[in-house]
Image (cartoon, grey):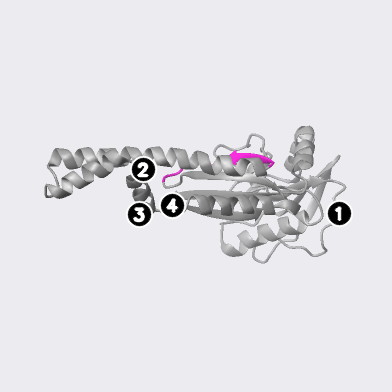
Amino acid sequence: MSTYVYGITASSHPALPEKLSGVGDPPLPVRVLKEGELAAVVSDAPEGLRPKRKDLLAHQSVLAEAGAEGAVLPMRFGSIAPDDESVTGVLAERADHYKERLQALDGKVEYNVKATHQEDAVLHRVMSENPEIRAMTEANRQSGGGSYEERLRLGEMVVAAVQARETEDAADVQRALEPVAADVSEGPESTGWLVNVSFLVDRESAEPFLTAVEQVRSSHPHIELRVNGPLPPYSFVEPGPPQHAGSAAGPGVAQE
């Protein structure tokens, strides 16, 4: 049977609670596979696993139990290996890397920050900062809206100014938050986000980071910041190459 992998810990990690269960219907019992100084928190992999709320929460719950007692490298939901031997084989092969990561991430959590512009507010700011745009807007208004060419030119100027503001604001957000984080991981680019960045933060001293977030909100009211965390440090595991094409799951495991 395939093996579902929740995360990697040190083999000296305190024992998990008895009868801890994970994904599956019914929930499958969680166990630990040890290989030298490392261990993997696993269960059997259920057939036809899909990202349903119940299983997503079960995955998070197992990681929360493991992380409460010490450092754990979290695997993303759906991380599946062909069998137990495949898991322990990767632990042996990449032992130095995983031991370094466990040390680096001990006591750390992840905060993901996404930023977007509030459309009306950013347009107001662009107008207030650009006298040429204000003058052309007023000229068009006084002439009944302006010619097609004048309206087109105005639109191009506004778009260019908004794009410049997007670049500047994205840099401002990262510049404000990076000094209060231990590490930074850029998220995948996607339409609509000025910023999609994960920050590695000390679990016991997250207050300076969250204070910096509030300072950005205060100084940039035209930006909407969405902060998700504290999370297991998924973005900082630096997984090895997957065994199956298209997998992005982690240490030699395939992702459903």
Kindly identify which residue carries mark 4.
222
The mark that comes first in sequence, 2 or 1, is 1
The overriding secondary structure of the stretch rendered in magenta is: loop
Residue 250 appears in the rendering: no
| Label 2 CA crowd tier, 10 Å (few <14, some 14–19, many 20+) | few
Kindly identify which residue carries mark 3.
120
Horizontal side, residue 215 vs residue 26: left or right:
left
Q: Are marks 2 and 1 in contact (CB under 8 Å)?
A: no
- Report helix, strand or loop for mark 4: loop
User: In this rendering, is residue 52 above or below 215?
Assistant: below
User: In this rendering, is residue 85 above or below 53?
Assistant: above
Which callout, 1 or 4, points to the residue nearer the camera?
4
Mark 4: amino acid = His
- Report helix, strand or loop for mark 2: helix
Q: Are marks 1 and 4 in contact (CB under 8 Å)?
A: no
Q: CA distance from mark 3 to mark 2?
A: 14 Å
Kindly identify which residue carries mark 1.
14
Kindly identify which residue carries mark 2.
129
- Report helix, strand or loop for mark 1: loop
Identify the residue at horizontal 85%, vertical 40% (top origin).
37
How far across and how far down the image is residue 233, in percent? 67, 47
The mark that comes first in sequence, 3 or 2, is 3
